[in-house]
Image (cartoon, coloured by chain):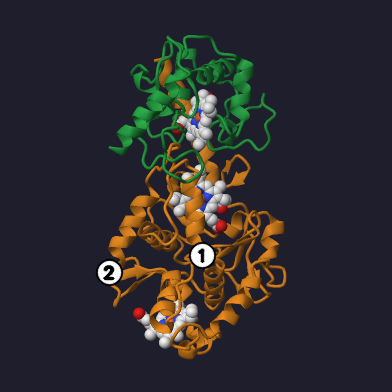
Chain colours: A orange, B green
Amino acid sequence: MKRTGLLQTAGLIGLIAMATTATAQDDSQLVVNGEIEMVTDAPAPENIGGLKTIYSGWRFRQSEMQALQTDDFENPGAYAIDEGVEMWATVEGSEGKSCASCHEDIEDSMAGVRAVYPKWNESKGQVMTLAQQINDCRTEQMGAEAWKYDGGDMTSMEAAISLQSRGMPVNVATDGPAADAWAKGEEMYYTRYGQLELSCANCHEDNYDNNIRADHLSQGQINGFPAFRIKTGKLTQTHNRFKGCIRDTRAETFSPGSDEFVALELYVASRGNGLSVEAPSVRP
Amino acid sequence: MKRTLILAAALIGSGAVVSAQTVSPDDVAYDEYGSIEVSLSGAAGDPAVGAEIMSDRGQGNCVACHQVSALTAAFQGNIGPSLDGAGDRWDEAQLRGIVADAKMTFPDSMMPSFYKVSGFIRPGNAYTGKAADDTFTSLLTAQQIEDVVAYLATLKE
């Protein structure tokens, strides 16, 4: 009898704590360089049952950090764009080609590409991330060596390509041939990994807008990636973020570029369908 | 196969610090509500040590998820309820059960199981991201659980 009462009380307190998750930190709107209006909240996609509204990670940051992303002269991640654009025109490999040899102007050929990745590749018969596609062009088209999946060169190239989609809505396909990978990613999202037995959903779905020690939890969206992290002082790729979040559950984590992370990326990207591509974003 | 090895190793690992009365994680008797009647270490807990364990990021780090007014630890989280008054709401056996394995009291709770060594998915070697090896132990020792329980019992309103 007494126990039941106690349990109910604890449950109610829990509910109150949960109720505060209904709104993101503030209603600020993100406009970059005074012209690109970003969508930082949107109705959740229909196949994402756990959320009603999706929010960009930007909405959970403090105003000083938010401000850094409003102007490319302030954005500490902007360096990578110049690096990426320079590499775009750099000839490498046995075929004597650069990216530009085939794709010409990055601004035209890469517009909208980031927004639909990861994407099913018919000739390969698999879902591919942007990084995998870039390496495929290097090895198969240029006769050049693959870049390290999460190395600096790859991250800068990803940033330069992503920039060409900045402000466009994320719109990855989750059905058709991509459905299997998406389902695998969804299962991972709800798996309670590691000695702490925590799933992505425990933190980023059930508790976004709550604090875990000093960290203000966001929905763990990837529309801002690659993201400049103030903590590490460099641009970080999606898979590196995933790797760290799983490691922090005291789990054996997965490797960047692994099949598991490709599937997880597709699924997490789809949770952000409708938010603007923000890369390069600025995050803690 | 791998899991059995880890488990066996963990048992041997904690064996080194185990006294005669210590109940090992796999032998803990929870009642149907998730309570544990007897001390896991066979000894009483020290509330002052318990307070430290609760604030320390490398140990219990309970304040990552709970707010406790009596603790000075910075940046207390709000994932779980405030623990103020926990000593009024729960008796010692209930508190011991919650701290050792909260999922026995609150099914599917997000709260980690602090006195458990088996049944994990991809258990790691602390925060290295690598697989668990023969150094794997429960998050807290039997005596640390008792110290935390002793501190929680002092949280009265």
Q: Chain of mark 1?
A: A
User: Residue at coordinates 56% horizontally, 67% vertically from top-left?
Assistant: A152
Amino acid under disc 2: Pro
Q: Position of residue B64 (x, y in %)?
A: 58, 36
Q: Position of residue B120 (x, y in %)?
A: 37, 37
User: Would you say B155 lies left or right of A126 here?
Assistant: right
User: Residue at coordinates 42% horizontally, 81% vertically from top-left?
Assistant: A143
Visible residue check, residue A217: no
Q: Secondary structure at mark 1?
A: loop
Q: Position of residue A219 (x, y in %)?
A: 51, 53
Q: Position of residue B52 (x, y in %)?
A: 63, 24
Rendered view: A251 above or below A102: above
Q: Quadrant of residue A255?
A: bottom left
Task: Write down the residue under mark 2.
Answer: A177
Q: Earlier in the sequence, mark 1 or mark 2?
A: 2
Amino acid under disc 1: Asn
Rendered view: B147 above or below A210: above
User: Residue at coordinates 44% horizontally, 71% vertically from top-left?
Assistant: A130
Q: Quadrant of the C terminus of chain B?
A: top right
User: Would you say A17 lies left or right of A70 here?
Assistant: left
User: Would you say A263 lies left or right of A11 here?
Assistant: left
Q: Secondary structure at mark 2?
A: helix
Q: Nearer the viewer, residue A47 or B3?
A: B3
> For residue A223, which numbered disc appears in the image?
1
User: Residue at coordinates 64% horizontally, 53% vertically from top-left?
Assistant: A231
